[in-house]
Image (spheres, rainbow, N blue to C red):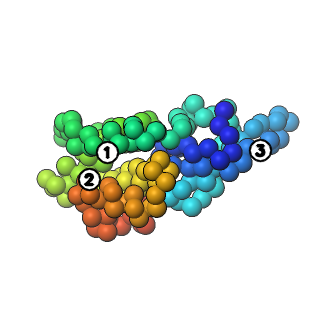
Amino acid sequence: MFQVGDKIFYPTQGGCTIQAIEEKEILGETVLYYTVNILHRKMLVQFPTSKTDRLKIRPIVDPDKLDNVLTTFFDGETELTTRDNQRIQRNLSKIKSGDIYEGAEVIRDLVRSNNKKKLGITEKNMMEDALQILISEVVLVKGITKQQASDLLDQIINIPMSNLSLTNSMPIG
């Protein structure tokens, strides 16, 4: 079980900190809830502690794993799918998995696709959201500001984050 102050990763939301653990009475049953602060959305959410596995909540990655993700960012091949809806569903599944490597693959593949042909609005929003999710974990793992994390990813990916409308992205899932 996580403790107050722990840094966690919530797929589709990103890096979070646990603000509180509270008991709530629901239909006559006492249930423990986490209250978490979603870093990049500046929002508090609650979910039952018993649902962490189903929601694929995990501790943030360690610095070595993050460095490995960042240094191997463009390794691997992009899976070519001709149909947009198949590609979108595959990428959404990767984001929802909570696996940092799969999240980075989504960004990598969408960057490659965007370099060949301008992304449609759905995939552009997905790339923006995936970037924000990764940025939020970088912030927590490295103990740096959002701007520093954004600049770091900008150097790695070579896409100026200012070219993306990250503040206008829509939530995934």
Between marks 1 and 3, how big is the CA–CA gap? 36 Å
**Residue 163 in sight:** yes
Local packing at callout 1 (Cα closer than 10 Å; few below 14, some 14-19, many 20+) is some
In depth, the one of 60 and 125 nearer the eye is 60
Quarter of image, res 68: top left
Q: Picture coordinates of residue 53 (x, y %)?
A: 57, 31
Q: Picture coordinates of residue 88 (x, y %)?
A: 32, 44
Q: Picture coordinates of residue 41 (x, y %)?
A: 53, 59
Name the residue carrying label 3.
22
Between marks 1 and 2, how big is the CA–CA gap? 7 Å
Name the residue carrying label 2.
156
Q: Residue furthest right?
A: 28
Q: Looking at the picture, which amino acid does disc 3 mark?
A: Glu
In-image side of 141 versus 2 (left or right) = left
Does label 1 or label 2 sit earlier along the sequence? Answer: 1
Name the residue carrying label 1.
70
